[in-house]
Structures are given as structure tokens and as C-alpha cells.
Amino acid sequence: MLGGLLLPRAAAAEPVALTVAIGGPAEDPAYLPVHAALALGTFEAEGVKVTLKRAKHPTGAVAALRDRETGIAVTTLDEAIRGAWARKIPVQVLAAHVRAPAVALLVAPAARDTVRRVEDLRGKAVGIPGPGTTGHLLLAALLRGARIQPWQVDTRSVGSTALLAQLGTGDLAAAMVEEPWVSRLLAAGRAGVLIDFRQPAEVERVLGGPFYEVVSVAVTPSKDDKDKKETSKAGADARKGTPARIEPPPETALAAYARAVARVQAWLAITPPAVVAERLPPALVGDRARFEARLGAQQAAYAGTGDVTREGFEATIRVLRGGGSPWPVSLTVGPDDLAPPPGVAEARRQLGASPPPP
């Protein structure tokens, strides 16, 4: 009898299972909070059992969410909009991971006397990591702000190795450089900073608000009528031998996920990198010196507990819409569409400004 009474309670205490597609490695501080929350047991402490489905690229994470192979995707906001909203699959942001991207506009040593402001880039060769990258999008925003037409700058898309080499030789007057190369070039005195987007204050000054590059998103039940209609079809597919697709997680599970990410993210933002490295499993840290250096360079960029602001959404959308390949003309998405579900926002709010550490 005692066993019969205890079983229902044990079942009720079982954490809700969540499959999360993640489009970036743990070595990238923007994706580290999710990897760390899993390793530290923070997800289960909040009541969810997370299984990570690793994708090679943020695009793959959105594809997994779109195909209902996962309930949550950790990806860039750009991919969330292009890969989900543009395909009529509305997603909402559960948490913003960073409020500043890991990129800076650096000036070559040979051009330090001639390039002192963005307007000086007119007629110069400027490198970007690749078309559609965050560096490309931010450079386009800078040129628009300086009233420089795209054809007035010799924009060159080159790989990281070539970009660094050409910046060093002076073949490029300036370049949008990503971490960890920014820190390494500056430490070696091999480049100067024109715009440091790694610093939240600089991002807000230049863009008018935070820049939410990496976010966790989900299709919530209330926003996806199609999912409701296909509940019975999922069971039928399973009987035919086709894996049943994952239903959108309940808002309580999404809130628990967001709380876990918030706790870890707030801890990562203020804890000395050496202490973080000591707490995390060696397999997650990898090369310790590199891990500590990269985390230290980007700690200021963490978006606190993951809260988002209207100004941040508006600033990010302006950058995303204005650069790279254009969005569909019919696509209209704004801060209210992307805002977290009420239950998720409230769950994070209850943690307070200083959440308990993981």
C-alpha cells in the first residue's frame, strides 16, 4: 500500500522532458549558458530534463524547430526570423543570451592616421567575415549611419585567416573581426579599434539599443493553431513507422527552461572566468587558457537574466532588415510578436536582479 501511495508522488515529481536544438558550440560564450545549465544540473533543478540536439549552424537549429524535432531552438534572431517567421511559423523569444555581438571594427596599423571615424572608410577596402554574417550586417548599418553608399566602399568577403593577414599587411584598411581574434590582435598591438561592438554601451550608442544576436526561441501552443490540428496526426505517423513530431512544450516547461538559463547566465556574467572553468566539466572547458580569455572578453555582453526590451528588439530588427539579403516584402514582425510569453517573463521576473547561482 505504501508503495502504491508513493508512486503517484514520484511520477508527479518527474521533470518535464525538453529537446533543445542548439546552433553553436560551448566555446562560444553566447551558447555557453545552455551547455553549462545542462552540465551543472540547473535545468533539472528547475523541473525540466533537457536533451541537446546539436546543430552545425544556427540555421540547422531553426530547421529542427520548424520540423518539430525539438521544442526549443538556440539560434540567432536573424535565423529565427528568416527560418521561422518568414515561413509563417511565429516564434517567441524565451531568453536573449547576449546584448552585444562578439565583433569589432578594427583598423589596420597602416591606416591608423587616415581612418579615424566611419566616414573615413569611403573609398577604402574593408573586410568582412562573410556575406550575411553579423559583421556584414553591422558594417552595413554603420555605412548607412555615415551616409556612405555600399558602392563607395570596397567591401571584401574573405575567410578569417585571409582577413587577418590582409589587415596586417594593409591590403585592408579596416575589417569587421570576430572573437577570439579581436582580443588577440589588440593584445599584440596589431590593430586599433574604431567601433567595439563587444561593449554594450557602444552598441547602444551606435545602434540605439541592445543587439540580440543569439536567443532561445520556441513556438508556443497559443501561437500555433496548426500544431493543435495535427495532434492526432502525430500519433498516426508514429503507428506508420514515422517518428512522431514533438508537440510545443507547455508554458510552464518553457518558463522553467528560461529560469535555468537566467540563473546560469547571470552567474557567468559576474563570476571570474577561472572560477567558472573550475566548476564546469573539463570536456566543456577544453583549453582552459583560451576558455578563460574568451569568456573574460565577452562577459560584459551577456544579457543578464535574458530579459528583452522593446528598444533592443527595434535596434536589432533595424540592423537585420537593412543588411544582407532582404526580408520578404510581406513579412512584418515587431517587438510585440517576438516578446516572451507572459508566463516566461513572469518566471524570470520572480528570480529578481540577482538570481541564485547554479
Image: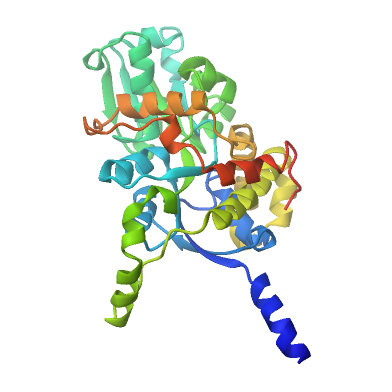
Q: Would you say 250 lies left or right of 171 here? A: right
Q: Would you say 356 lies left or right of 72 here? A: right
What percent of the width, then of the height, locates residue 178? 46, 34
Q: Can residue 170 be seen in this view?
A: no
Residue under the point 74% across and 84% down: 5
Q: In which quarter of the image is residue 268?
A: top right
Q: Looking at the image, is 73 positioned above or below residue 79?
A: below
Q: Would you say 222 lies left or right of 32 here? A: left
Residue under the point 46% across and 8% down: 116
What percent of the width, then of the height, locates residue 102? 50, 34
**Rendering colour mode:** rainbow
What percent of the width, then of the height, locates residue 229? 31, 61
Q: Looking at the image, is 98 positioned above or below residue 63?
A: above
Q: Observer-nearest residue: 352 or 9?
A: 9
Q: Is residue 303 visible?
A: yes
Q: Looking at the image, is 71 positioned above or below residue 327?
A: below
